[in-house]
Amino acid sequence: MTGRPQRWLVPLLAMLLIAAAAMSLLAGTVWLRPGEALAAVFGDRPSVAGLIVTEIRMPRVILGMMIGGMLGLTGACLQGLLRNPLAEPGLLGISAGASFGAVIAIYFGFAAGFTLATPLFGLAGAFVTAAVALILSRGGGTLSLILAGSALSSIAGAGVVLALNLAPNPYAAYEIMTWLMGSLVDRSWDHVKLTAPFMAAGGALLFLTRRSLDALALGEAQAESLGINVAQTRLLALLGTALGVGAATAVAGIVGFVGLVAPHLMRPLVGHQPGRILLPAALTGAILVTLADIATRTIVLGGMPLNLGVFTSMIGAPFFLWLVLHVRKRTP
């Protein structure tokens, strides 16, 4: 496929994202009319609608777009780097590490004493996991990186289960479980300010791998023969994932399958070129999370609203099953 489709693809995705964000500002327990939302944003008089839009929904929408964009971008980068269509941000153990860090903050009561303790501990967990994975896989190639990530993910998962088992009280266990299910409820501008620099830095590092990913599609040996520094590309991808996904998981909990689904939706439209899929996958991930967040505010099952991570899993798990069957059918 030629490069022509991407000329309309990115503007189309950008318009869809703007439409989804606008809808997200209106949706909720209290639905707003477009005129009310515009008056709330640009009007001079303070109002209840203004508080709802500017202090509750707008930071939530921005955070959702940032998280979805980062998950989609990371998934596309890792699938190109590892040459594995099933790769996603959780494969390197960074999501699990961020989760374990956040659970430590809840378990030991730091979250109760400081509002941003949970995301800060989550970020620390992501960075520690990335550093250990890098040390363990040093000089061992891509397979070694995957194995190190899988091992660290298992260890972090065991730590989360242990914390649930030894939770000091039912409230702590409930808080840990709620956080693990992923949510954007009660997220504020403080959360946006805390995570935005890490996600921006992570996104920039991941985009730097763009040219190398196209060469890596031919294999590591062929890429090196073309002058690509594979070790440097792997380091950029790992640091970018640690910064971006670590920040996303730290602030919203586990939001699964977005990094897996978004690249696959865009891959046929960009000619299956790993380098060209990064921006469309990021925009698609942002759209998916924004729409999923709207769904969690409007869909109620059994009198209970759905958590963001639960909803994305309900949509992503069948897609993952289809993907496995599709890959198996194409494997000789």
Image: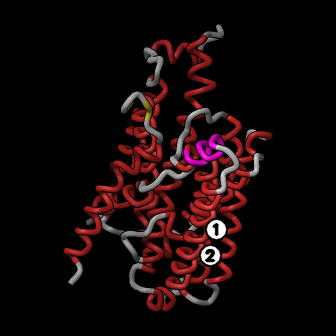
Q: Disc 2 residue type?
A: Leu
Residue at x-position 65% and y-position 70%: 130
User: Where does the image place residue 313, in percent across and percent down from the top left?
Assistant: 40, 51
Decide if residue 29 is in sight here: yes
Residue at x-position 58% and y-position 57%: 245
Q: Is residue 322 left or right of residue 57?
A: left
Q: Is residue 198 magenta?
A: no
Residue at x-position 41% and y-position 77%: 83
Q: Is residue 322 left or right of residue 42?
A: left
Q: Is residue 29 left or right of residue 45?
A: left
Q: Is residue 183 left or right of residue 1?
A: right
User: Where does the image place residue 45, in percent across and percent down from the top left?
Assistant: 65, 8
Looking at the picture, does residue 31 appear above or below residue 263? above
Looking at the picture, does residue 52 appear above or below residue 197? above
Label number found at residue 239: 1
Label 1: few (<14), some (14–19) or many (≥20) C-alpha neighbours in 10 Å: many
User: Where does the image place residue 141, in percent across and percent down from the top left?
Assistant: 54, 87
User: Where does the image place residue 193, in percent across and percent down from the top left?
Assistant: 70, 41
Judging from the image, what secondary structure is the residue with disc 1 in? helix
Looking at the picture, does residue 271 appear above or below residue 21? below
Q: Is residue 172 magenta?
A: yes
Label number found at residue 319: none
Magenta span: predominant SS is helix
Task: Give the image quarter of residue 216.
Answer: bottom left
Q: Evaluate if marks 2 and 1 touch, with contact meaning CB atoms under 8 Å apart.
A: yes
Residue at x-position 64% and y-position 68%: 239
Residue at image mark 2: 235
Q: Nearer the viewer, residue 12 or 89?
A: 89
**What coloring was used for the rendering?**
secondary structure
Q: Disc 1 residue type?
A: Leu
Residues in magenta, as a range: 170-177
